[in-house]
Amino acid sequence: MDTAALVNLGLALAFGGCFGGLMAGLLGVGGGIVFVPILFAILNYMGYDLAITMHLSVASSLCIIILTSISSVRAHHRKGAVDLAIVRAWAPWVIAGAVIGGLLARVLDASVLTGVFGVVALLAAANLMLPKTYDLKRPAPTTGILGAIIPTSISFVSTLMGIGGGSISVPTLTAFGVPVHRAVGTSAAIGFFIALPGALAFMISGLGLEGRPPISLGYVNFVAVVLVAPLSVLFAPLGARLAHALDPLWLKRAFGVFLAFNGVRMLWTTFSAVL
């Protein structure tokens, strides 16, 4: 690859880091919903096999989110916007869902990952873009069957998408009556417990796989991580400050538009691969 192409790739990764970090703080999405499409496009442009580029994008995104979520959580926690009771109760189930998703990824076709990404993103967008989001009129469950199923499901699907879970956990928490700013901050904390075990599981499930980019461990490519992570961490606190300065209704709408755009994009990729 010539120098100009390498420079363009570096600029694309830098932009992805800045924009992803901003979204992590602003929307509590962990940045993955930005990182995955960008990394996917870059790896495809570089000529890597479509059968593994989505797996590489998802796994590398999770690794980046480990650092991004820490930065975002600190910013939200300083504003008292993290519900620690929910985080403590959900964390074990979130970890379990992430491990299962990461280990299962190797046997799943790339179209499954892009399809999951697209469908869940559109469902979450629809929920947020409705005039009035669904209200379950009860607090978020932290015990019992629902207290286990909900966080495990959020984590499992989020791991397959390569996101920190905000696309699912923010609408879920707001449906249980958690104010949107507090839902965003709590989601950012949950994202850490998705990203760390999820990335480790993807590393294990991708060991020995042929055709990966240089400096990869399993499905995680550390070139992408090193280029994107620092900028995403730098911009996450700015996003968190913006989140607390914006009207909650407009924050929900902005989140919905953003999710819908990325959902359509990924479904287009899925159908193109299948047809």
Image (tube, grey):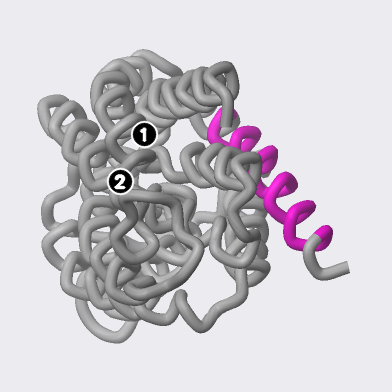
Residue 152 position in % (x across, y down): 33, 74
Q: Which residue is mark 1?
A: 24
Please, is residue 45 above or below residue 167 in the view? above
Whichever of labels 1 and 2 marks the residue nearer the N terminus, that label is 1
Residue 113 position in % (x across, y down): 58, 66
Quadrant including the N terminus: top right
Residue 222: image tag: 2
Frontmost residue, 113 versus 236? 113
Marks 1 & 2, CB-CB < 8 Å contact:
no
Residue 70 visible to the viewer: yes
Q: Residue at x 24, y 41 (%)?
A: 69
Real-space Cα distance between discs 1 and 2? Answer: 20 Å
Residue 157: image tag: none
Frontmost residue, 237 versus 228? 228
Q: What's under tag 2, amino acid-wise?
A: Phe
Quarter holding residue 31: top left
State the extent of the magenta-drawn residues as a range.
254-272
Frontmost residue, 213 versus 1? 1
